[in-house]
Image (tube, helix red, strand yellow):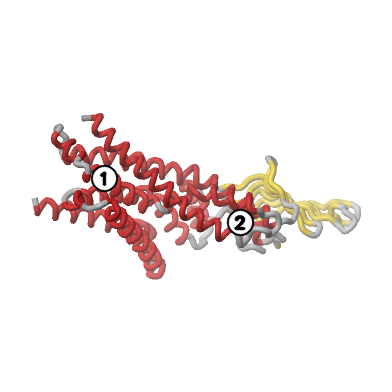
Amino acid sequence: MWILRLYLARNVFLGFVVTALIIVGLFSIVLLIEELDDVGTGGYDLTMSLRYVLLHMPMVLNDFAAVISLIGAVVVLGALAGKHELIAIQSLGGTPRNIVTSVLMAAALIMSLMLLSAEFLVPKTLQQAQMEKALATADQGDFVSKSGYWAQSDGQYIHIKQIEDGRTPYDIELFEFTVDYRLRRYLTASYADIQSQEQWLLHDVSEKTLVGERMQQKNHDTLQWQSFLSAEQLGVIISSPQALSITDLNQFVQGLKQRGEKSYPFEVLFWQKLMSPLAAGIMIVLGLSFVFGSQRQVSTGQRITIGVLTGMGFYVFSQMINHLGFALGWQPLLVAGSPNAIAIIALLLLAYLRQAKA
């Protein structure tokens, strides 16, 4: 029986992979067309735009994992039912529970991969894509090395050794030079809160200023700094919230709360990242419920249509709940979890109706 279970689980997983290649490929083509508008800006060329799109593929896969899971499950399981393979499995002693268990094995594998991707792969590839594009389009002599990020403008230089939680600069050095290239001011700071593009709040600051022929030193707990970094330069060091891992996003939210700053949108995003893999698993089981019964008699084209319409309906509904929740100020967990909860209710209702008909 385990061989049959693995056979079903493998087919469901392969269905997910094939569907992912098609859907991610289509969305990547759309993204590439959009990126062509930026080709020629600074040092951003066609090769870099292709790399940018490739690095976005893991994020696209995670964003549409639920849709991909449903379409893949409906097509693969529908094909097996159409060829009477599910009936053959039951004739060999397999029960509907065995079939469900096999599908759940594939769902568990896909959910695990999506969760690992959201935590490790997507942040790395998305941050790399954003940094490379920002460096290319900034075109101001900025560079990133093993020692950190360097940028300069009108005699001012900044060196940032590391970025924590994708958005907080640590170990900062600031240099200001006179027109004859003499060091006028030198600052070091443990870290900075980026309050806006122009305003940074530096913490644990040591300031050395040239007064006459001597350097005077002052220490500050905090110090406001008027940033010279452009939006493009800032994009090199600051990751978008979508590019943060689940762990980093949680740390970022806790930091915002401690400072008394608005954290609601990031809390919603945190729960959405956690709920997305679960949505993929739910959609696979929902796909199985479509296959049992009359679905064994429909064509492959009809199965694809059912999967696409249901999957896109779930995606649109999720977006509607997201916007409605923001407008009404719902709890972040409620905003992120409502689509999954309603999908589970629909799944249980389908199971009840089929049981009642039987």
Which residue appears at 49% of the width and 57% of the height? Answer: 257
The disc label shown at residue 67, or none? none
Using the rendered view, name the quadrant where residue 139 is placed.
bottom right
Identify the residue shown where x is 36% and y is 45%: 16
**Coordinates of residue 84 in the picture (x, y in percent):** 19, 41
Dividing the image into 4 quarters, which one contains the N terminus?
Answer: top left
Going by the numbered disc 2, the residue's amino acid type is Asp
| Identity of the residue drawn at 27% across and 41% down | 104
Answer with mark 2 or mark 1, whichever residue precedes in sequence.
1
Question: Percent from the top left, x then y, of residue 29?
Answer: 51, 55
Write down the residue under mark 1.
Answer: 79
Q: Position of residue 102 (x, y in %)?
A: 25, 38
User: As rendered, which of 293 and 219 lies closer to the eye?
Assistant: 293
- Cβ atoms at labels 2 and 1 below 8 Å apart: no
Where residue 301 sits: x, y (%)? 30, 54
Q: Nearer the viewer, residue 123 or 106?
A: 106
Residue 71 in view of the camera:
yes
Tell whether 148 sits left or right of 327. right
Left or right of residue 322, residue 130 in this image: right
Question: Would you identify the image quadrant in which residue 148 lies?
Answer: top right
Q: Which residue is mark 2?
A: 193
Residue 341 visible in the snapshot: no
**Badge 2 local density, few (<14 within 10 Å), some, or many (20+)?**
some
